[in-house]
Amino acid sequence: MTHELPFVQFRPYGPDRFAAHLPFGRVGHLFTVPGSFPADTPAHTNVTDWEMATYRSYGEWEVRDVNGNRRVWGTGPTRRAAVGLALLEIARKRRERAADIAEKRVKVLGLEPVPPFAVEVTGAVTLVLSPQAIGILRQIQPSETGPARYAVNDVDGGEPYDIRADDSVTLRTTQVGVFHDRCGHDPEDAYRFENQIDAEVYARHALSMCWPCSGLND
């Protein structure tokens, strides 16, 4: 059996990583399973990223989660096989959980299987406003001998420059986004709502500009 593991990056650990009484090998490798895995589960059911450990145990490789129940998710003759089986089991459990959430939303709460409205934050920018110029903030440069300076990009695409901080200079952060209304998209970085009024109120207060989603997910 082969397993495609495109997002797994192994980090070696030594005997000082885990206390001796914990059920982990004294040496092994750590890796992270993203909370958005597998990709076919709705984003509102995503969990936090899981740190996992894989190590040799009784002649095989074993995989456990580090911060949860520390259960064994997979074993195999090679590290790759053990991790692949662990990922398959994690995916199965997360799909079951997503299905349970959808069922409870419909049967218990009388809602749609997934929240029908989402406000996705697609970008943010901080403007530095001064009487002489307006720039897009790149970084703040502190100074030990005088006022800090704001390193900015020109809003019209000109050369970068600095604006000296003083009482006449203000910062203004703006956010822009997209309003999704049953369009089939499932953005990860979004706030979800059960009704249109709440979604519109959030978009109006949290975002400087918001556009309606213009198409269905392919």
Image (spheres, grey):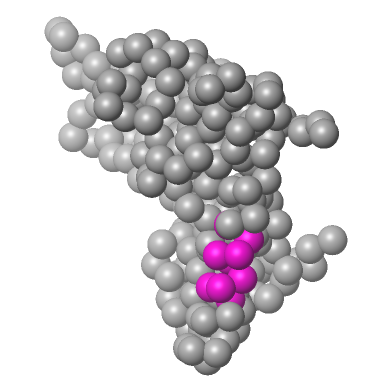
Which image quadrant is residue 71 in? top left
Say if 52 sits above or below 176 in the image.
above
- Report the residue at 34% width, 35% height from top: 130
Q: Nearer the viewer, residue 59 or 147?
A: 59
The question of residue 98 being in magenta is answered with: yes
Can you give x and y, in whole percent of width and height, for residue 138 in the image?
A: 44, 26
Say if 6 sits above or below 175 in the image.
above
Say if 5 sits above or below 125 in the image.
above
Q: Quadrant of the C terminus?
A: bottom right
Q: Nearer the viewer, residue 109 or 118?
A: 109
Which image quadrant is residue 151 in? top left
Q: Nearer the viewer, residue 95 or 18?
A: 18
Can you give x and y, in whole percent of width and height, for residue 175 in the image?
A: 47, 52
Can you give x and y, in whole percent of width and height, for residue 56 in the image?
A: 53, 19
Taking the image as shown, residue 71 lies to the left or right of residue 62, namely left
- Report the residue at 40% width, 35% height from top: 66
The question of residue 69 being in magenta is answered with: no
Q: Which residues fall within the magenta stretch?
A: 94-102
